[in-house]
Image (spheres, grey):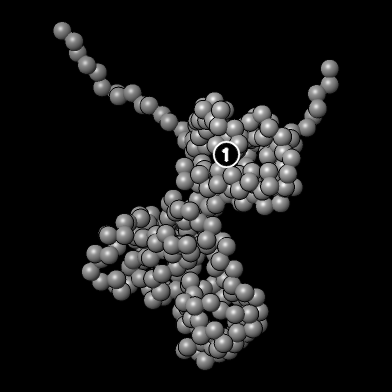
Amino acid sequence: MATSSSTDFDLDVADYIEEAFERCGLEVRTGYDLKTAKRSLNLLLAEWANRGLNQWTIKQTSITTASGIRVYPGGTLTMTVGASGAFSVGETITGSVSAATCSITNLPSATSFAITIPVGLFTTADTLTGGSSGATTTLTTAVDFSDVQSTIDILSTVVRRDNTDYSVPRVSRDDYLTIPNKTSEGRVDQFFLNRLITPELKVWPVPNNNTDIIIFNRLTRIQDADAYTNTFEVPFRFYPCLAAGLAYYLSLKRAPDRTQLLKTIYDEEFDRAAVEDRDRASFTIQPGLGYSRFN
C-alpha cells in the first residue's frame, strides 16, 4: 500500500468557513454567510492574541540607539527618501507640507531613515528638512506603521554593547513615571512598553551613543483573514483548533442549540493547542552529593 508522500495539507479561508458551517448543521448559501463567517474568524484570531496563543509569530527585532533619544518604536519603522547622505543621526526632521516631525535613529541606507514615531502624519512628496544639518530630501513613499502596530507585547530584551549582551528588564508604567531624572544618560538597563496603537519603548538611561543595539523578542499579530482564497500563517497542529473555534463562534449567531457542544469541543482543542504552543527547554534534576544518617 502506497502512502501519499505529501505533507502539504492546508485550508484556506473558504475551507474553514465551510467546515464551520457544516459543524453547525448548516450550508453556506449567500454572500452574507461568507461575510459574517469571515468577521467571526478575524475575531477568533484576536481572541487568540489575547490568550497569547501564537508563539509562531514571535519576531526578534533590533534597533540601533541614537544618543539622546529615549523613545523608540516597538518594531521596525523606516521612511524611504530621495537621499539621506547629508542628514545626521539624532536630529529632528520636519515635513514642509505636513509639518510632521520625527527624529532619525539610524541611517541604514542611502535612501532610508530609521525613525522615531512621528508627531503628525508625513505625506508623500513632503520635503524633509534636518533641524541641525539643514539637509533636505523628499519622502518618496508613505510611512508604513504596520510592522510596529502588529506588536502585541515584548517578551524579553537585551542591549548589545561591544559584542556583549546585557539583560534589560521591563518596568511598569508607574515605575517609569517615578524615575527622578529621565534624562540621565548611559547604557540602557530598563524599559517601559507604552502599549498604544503604535507601541513605543521608553528606555532608561537615555542612550549615550549611536552604536548600542536594543534587541527584543516581540509577540506580533496573526495576519487577518482577508481574501477567501487566503491561507493562514498557522502551524498545521492548530488547524483543528481554528476550525472548532470558528464553528463555536458561528453557532452563537446561527445554531444556538449546538453552542454548548461546540464550545466544549473548542475548549478541548484549544487546550491541546496551548500545550504545544510553548517553549521547551531542558530540565535537569541533580541529586545532592551529601547523605543523611538515620538512627
Q: Is residue 178 left or right of residue 48?
A: left
- Amino acid found under the numbered disc labelled 1: Lys
Q: Quadrant of the C terminus?
A: top left
Q: Residue furthest top?
A: 295
Which element is circle 1 on? helix
Which residue lies at the image location 25% right of the left edge and 71% below the top edge?
Answer: 181
Graded by Cα atoms within 10 Å as few (under 14), some (14 to 19) or many (20 or more), the crowding at tag 1 reads: few
Q: Image quadrant for the N terminus?
A: top right
Image location of residue 93, percent across then percent down: 50, 83
Picture residue at 47% right of the left edge, 89% below the top? 132
At which x and y percent is residue 243?
Answer: 63, 35
Q: Where 141 falls versus 275 (above or below)?
A: below
Toward the right, the furthest residue is: 1
Residue beneath label 1, please? 253
Q: Is residue 132 left or right of residue 4?
A: left
Left or right, residue 263 beside residue 71: right
Residue 163 appears in the figure: no
Q: Residue at x 30, y 74 (%)?
A: 183
Residue 199 to residue 13: above or below: below
Q: Position of residue 288 (x, y in %)?
A: 30, 24
- Residue 87 lies, with reference to residue 167, above or below; the image says below
